[in-house]
């Protein structure tokens, strides 16, 4: 009986002290990227600068509907404009292609809101480029454009 009581604590100690084997990541890279796109979109709507800062690479560049381009700091400042109220910000038909440490996302985007009290609405096509940097996916380039009516892909 005493041997049994000595072995039990030893086994319990091994269970709690032995490092767990690394877990396999169950989420595919494509699913991770879609989740990050949705996280970025939510941060954009809420003007969550901290989250946007963590998702955008330091050399991030975006081209928006009117052809304007912004760096990371310019984009974050643009998103923080309190004169713009985003009511709708939705993706559709997202497709992700992963090539090693690079992921390219294409899809549709719909945004509707007010800027300076004036309503606006965009129905865009978008392309985002994500790169795995130091173990984290970050977006390095983004392009939003309004499709020409009648044009096909």
Image: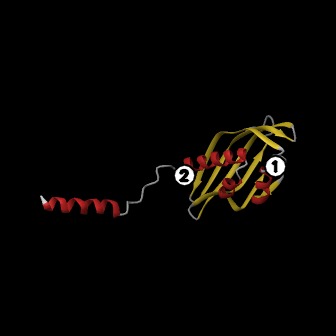
* Percent coordinates x, y for residue 84 in the rendering: 82, 43
| Label 1 Cα crowd, 10 Å radius (few <14 / some 14-19 / many 20+) | few
Q: Is residue 137 left or right of residue 1?
A: right
Q: Is residue 127 left or right of residue 101?
A: right
Q: Secondary structure at mark 1?
A: loop
The residue mark sitting in front, 1 or 2, is: 1
* Residue 131 position by quadrant: bottom right
On residue 29, the disc is 2
Q: Residue furthest left?
A: 1
Q: CA distance from mark 1 to mark 2?
A: 33 Å
For the rendered model, the colour scheme is secondary structure
* Percent coordinates x, y for residue 139 in the rendering: 67, 56
Above-or-below relation of 83 to 53: above
- The residue carrying mark 1 is 81
Identify which residue is drawn at 14% across, 62% down.
3
| Front in this rendered view, residue 153 or 10 | 10
Q: Secondary structure at mark 2?
A: helix
In which quadrant of the rendered image does the C terminus lie? top right
Identify which residue is drawn at 77% across, 59% down.
73
Residue 146 in sight in this render: no
Choose the circle earlier in sequence order: 1 or 2: 2
Identify which residue is drawn at 87% across, 41% down.
116
* Residue 86 position by quadrant: top right
Q: Are marks 1 and 2 in contact (CB under 8 Å)?
A: no
| Label 2 Cα crowd, 10 Å radius (few <14 / some 14-19 / many 20+) | some
| Front in this rendered view, residue 37 or 13 | 13
| Front in this rendered view, residue 48 or 93 | 48
């Amino acid at each position: 009986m005493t041997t049994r009581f000595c072995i039990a604590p030893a086994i319990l100690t091994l269970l709690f002290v032995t490092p767990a084997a690394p877990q396999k990541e169950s989420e595919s890279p494509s699913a991770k990227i879609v989740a990050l796109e949705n996280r970025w979109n939510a941060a954009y709507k809420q003007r969550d600068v901290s989250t946007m800062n963590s998702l955008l690479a330091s050399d991030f560049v975006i081209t928006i509907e009117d052809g304007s381009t912004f760096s990371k700091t310019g984009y974050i400042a643009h998103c923080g404009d309190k004169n713009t109220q985003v009511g709708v910000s939705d993706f559709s038909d997202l497709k992700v292609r992963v090539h090693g440490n690079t992921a390219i996302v294409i899809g549709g985007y719909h945004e509707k809101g007010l800027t300076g009290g004036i309503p606006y609405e965009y129905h865009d096509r978008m392309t985002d480029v994500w790169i795995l940097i130091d173990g984290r996916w970050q977006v390095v380039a983004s392009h939003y454009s309004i499709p020409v009516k009648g044009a096909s892909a």
